[in-house]
Image (tube, rainbow, N blue to C red):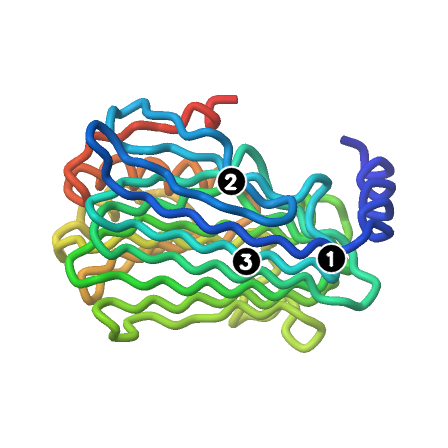
Amino acid sequence: MSSVANIEKAEAAQSSPSWNAELDCVFEAGPRRTIVRRSHSGPLTLQRPFYPEGDVAHVYLLHPPGGVVGGDRLQVNVQCKNNGKGLITTPGATKYYRSDGKYARVHQCLENHGGTLEWLPAENIFYSGCKVDIKTNVSLEDGQSLAWWDINCFGITSKSGQSFQGDVSNSLNVEVGSKLVLRERMLVEERFPLSMSCGLRSHNVAGTLLLTPLPSESIDLVRSVLKNKDGFSATHFDEMLLVRYVGDRSEQAKDVFGTIWSKMRLGLNSRAPSVPRIWAT
């Protein structure tokens, strides 16, 4: 899409009315496969689940048409219980457009009280002029698994010659057994631009992959995958494997994160990798 078309689309999105939307999704084991119980209000919903692995439900999260604009409020609640197995992805990037001053607010609450939870969406794209506040809260019972990633693109491409100008706050809280084990926040605004040496160092893509629980020796396999790959780093703590990316290619982040997830999935939840069909389109 040309830059002119992108600008026209952003201006059209800016003039659209705000959405208030909420989605509740529960994965629960049924007689033969995971049952997905869902309810929603507003333009936030799930497609009908697929079962390429038999009992694991693969579902596609659908965001408001045309992207997210200032004033939108989106609430996503996902729960796995009673041995329910769920993998959630999106059919495309979630786009946040220029705001007229209002913030778009997204709250994601992910819980695993007995089952497997995999949250593997496409990237977020933040256009210049956007105002966005994203909060993700994860709650896991002791010993329950999580595969989660988040890929953020500030502007369309670093080669556009234009630096990103906008306000984005993206926070993550992870609790295991009611104990807070990880809290972090990415903040990009006028005071904290992408060029900061303690931030993205003038890159425009940042990604995080989190897999838990995994043993400490899993870090060795991950570092072998990351060898000679610029922009990636990995660490392990409290049975959590954390991989980060800072660079300029969201496709590279997703490809490498997907490779690591595939290699770790058997140890994570006793499943061979099963790539969502939508990733191939």
Q: Position of residue 27 (x, y in %)?
A: 32, 44
- Within 10 Å of disc 2 (Cα), the crowding (few <14, some 14-19, many 20+) is some
Q: Is residue 151 left or right of residue 131?
A: left
> Is 166 placed above or below 13 here?
below
Residue kind at label 3, given as amino acid type: Gln
Q: Residue at x 74, y 60 (%)?
A: 70
Image-quadrant location for residue 36: top left
Q: Nearer the viewer, mark 1 or mark 2?
A: 2
Please name whichever residue, 130 or 204, is drawn nearer the observer in this view of the structure: 130
Q: Secondary structure at mark 3?
A: strand
Give me the disc on residue 49: none
Q: Earlier in the sequence, mark 1 or mark 2?
A: 2
Secondary structure under tag 1 reads loop
Mark 1 vs mark 3: give the one in front. 3
Task: Judge whether 251 appears above or below 21 on screen.
Answer: above
Type of amino acid under label 2: Leu
Q: Is residue 91 above or below residue 231?
A: above
Q: CA distance from mark 1 to mark 3?
A: 30 Å
Residue 156, position in %: x, y?
68, 44
The residue shown at (69%, 39%) is 65
Instruction: Write down the residue under mark 1.
Output: 163
Residue labelled with disc 2: 61
Disc 2 is placed on an element classified as strand
Q: Is residue 31 left or right of residue 205?
A: left
For disc 3, the marked residue is 75
